[in-house]
Image (tube, rainbow, N blue to C red):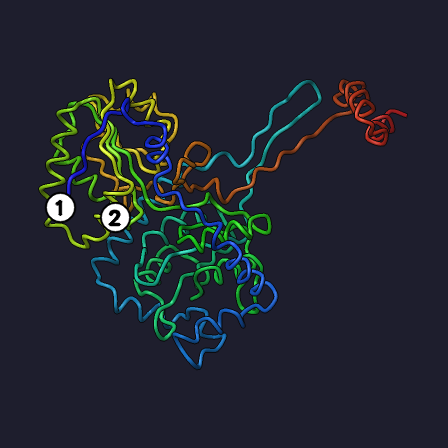
Amino acid sequence: MRITPEKIDDLGPERRKSVMERSMEDISSIFEDVRGIVNDVKKRGNAVALSHYQKHKPDITPADLEVSGAEIRKAYDKVDSRVVECLKIAARNITRFHTAQLEREMWAIEVSEGILAGRVRRAMDIVGCYIPGGTAAYPSSILMTVLPAKVAGVGKIVVVTPPGKGMVANPATLVAADIAGCDRIFKVGGPWGVAGLAFGTETMPRVDKIVGPGNKYVTAAKMLVYGQVDIDSPAGPSEALILADETGDPELIAVDFLSQVEHDPDSAAVLVTPSEQLAAAVCDIIEREYDTLPRKEIFESSLSRHSYLLIARDMEQAIEFTNEYAAEHLQILTRDPFITLNRIKHAGSIFMGPYAPVPVGDYASGTNHVLPTGQCARMFSGLSVDDFIKKPTFQYLSKEGLASLKDTVITLAEAEGLPIHARAVKARFQ
């Protein structure tokens, strides 16, 4: 299969729109179905999940919905010891990186004489982490969601994940959850798991925030319960943009490009470069490698629908396009990636230089892989300790401090038609 390089200048409005929109899913068609499930869980609690998961275990009971300590211990016997050790290595790096994100617990300044104002850091009481399951298991997502919450100081961390036949959770997921130190794990996925966390059931606790990746049904459910609980950014299929100049290695770029489209049929990969020679070389390598690829149906869909090799007039245009695309993952393969970094405004996570492929961030470098997709990097950041922390402000005023603001507050309150607001200040000087 061949992807033909295209010049950015030759992209018409519709073609450019298609590139930018990549695999952004319109989930409006499933909203009402998901709304029905969410409302049903709100009304009937566990009964909805029990009915849904009878397909896995005909004699299912409420006890089957939560993972037991014995099930976690058995999971260790089913997971290769090398995988366990690598999960622990990744967990150490993720913990160290996210610990560095913590700000001061409290700060204050004297705004003017007699007026002290500041802010304190307070972690959430309880959060829920959604972890995909079913045909694919992502124990790394456990580490990426639970550990930042743990570092932030969240009181209780609850995990939900879809079960398999017999109401058995994926062993690697359970091992990762144990390593990360979550408090409870429920074998409830999809809208049932999201709604259970949002409203609480007879067994599932109600949480303050739900984070973690999932399919379009999970995304729809999270959007429907937003306001009842907080959520992270809406998630779509994985995407990466490679920004390279003529110094880029076409062999490395080609394998990085292909590794991105390996995720699923809706994944997106884009190369942007001012070098026609580099784009042509990468194209030739992808064509050469294509016949050797596993799961060819996934690659064919992703390569043909959402992946592009784009040639810019110069690096200026390449960077401008990169910022407009606002990729979930951005690789910078330029002569001096740190200089290029200074000009990047929008990206979920940035990988710099020839020895920083995206998979290191997916698993073990310490940065988070729960990232905004579909141009949402323009206004969202990747998951961090900040997602689990509230920052209430405080103030203390002396009588002299209030006196200095008395006339200002009274005037503004009366101008807004709030006389009792004004009276609350006047009363302190009568």
Residue farthest to the bottom? 59
Which of the 4 quarters of the picture holds residue 364? top left
Q: What residue is at 32 percent from the left and 32 percent from the top? A: 15
Q: From the viewer's perspective, is 340 left or right of 66?
A: left
Residue 300 place in picture, x, y as percent: 21, 48
Rendered view: 77 above or below 261: below
- Residue 88: mark in rendering: none
How crowded is the residue under tag 1: few (<14 C-alpha within 10 Å), some, or many (20+)? some
**Alpha-carbon distance for marks 1 and 2?**
13 Å
Specify the amino acid type for callout 1.
Tyr
Residue at point 29%, 53% (across, down): 88
Q: Earlier in the sequence, mark 1 or mark 2?
A: 1
Which residue matches tag 2?
Answer: 301
Which residue lies under the disc numbered 1? 290
Please name the amino acid that badge 2 sits on: Ser
Question: Can residue 101 be seen?
Answer: yes
